[in-house]
Amino acid sequence: MDMAEEKRKFVRLNALVDVVYNKISPSVETKLSLIKNISKGGICLIAYEELKEQDMVDLKMFLPQEETPIQAVGRIAWVKEFSIGNLAEGRRFDVGVEFVEIKDEDAARIGKYVFAHLK
């Protein structure tokens, strides 16, 4: 276990979950992407453009078997670039997002989802 995992406050679940995100300022178009892992405290999403640490994003997350999306505001905590193939179009970014605004009931829904799928 590395030091980053030990510092986490919340258990993370590796799961592919749909997310729509929008950088708040300056506002950019809404993007559809995937969450790689999720916890009550934040997510790691895949971005197709470079976001910056400390950027704020609006999030709408679609948990499987849930009718209502979870909405939150998050702060970019870290960004790591990776590539798919050798082309410039293959640039992707893993983006760690910490929730700064989320309803208690939505955080509880995420917690329930995470613990139901940990095996």
Image (tube, grey):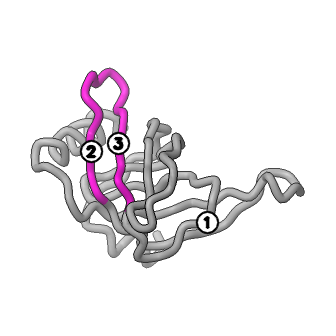
* Residue on which disc 3 sits: 60
User: Residue at 83% of width from left, 59% of height from top?
Assistant: 88
| Residue most extreme to the right | 86
User: Residue at 46% of width from left, 56% of height from top?
Assistant: 44
- Locate residue 78 relative to residue 13 in the image: left or right: right
* Residue on which disc 1 sits: 50
* Mark nearer the N terminus (2 vs 1): 1
- Locate residue 92 relative to residue 18 in the image: left or right: right
Q: In the image, residue 105 lies at what x, y percent?
A: 11, 42
Q: Amino acid at mark 3?
A: Lys
- Locate residue 91 relative to residue 12 in the image: left or right: right
* Residue on which disc 2 sits: 71
Q: In the image, residue 60 lies at what x, y percent?
A: 35, 42
Q: Amino acid at mark 2?
A: Gln
Q: Are marks 2 and 1 in contact (CB under 8 Å)?
A: no
Range of the magenta residues?
57-73
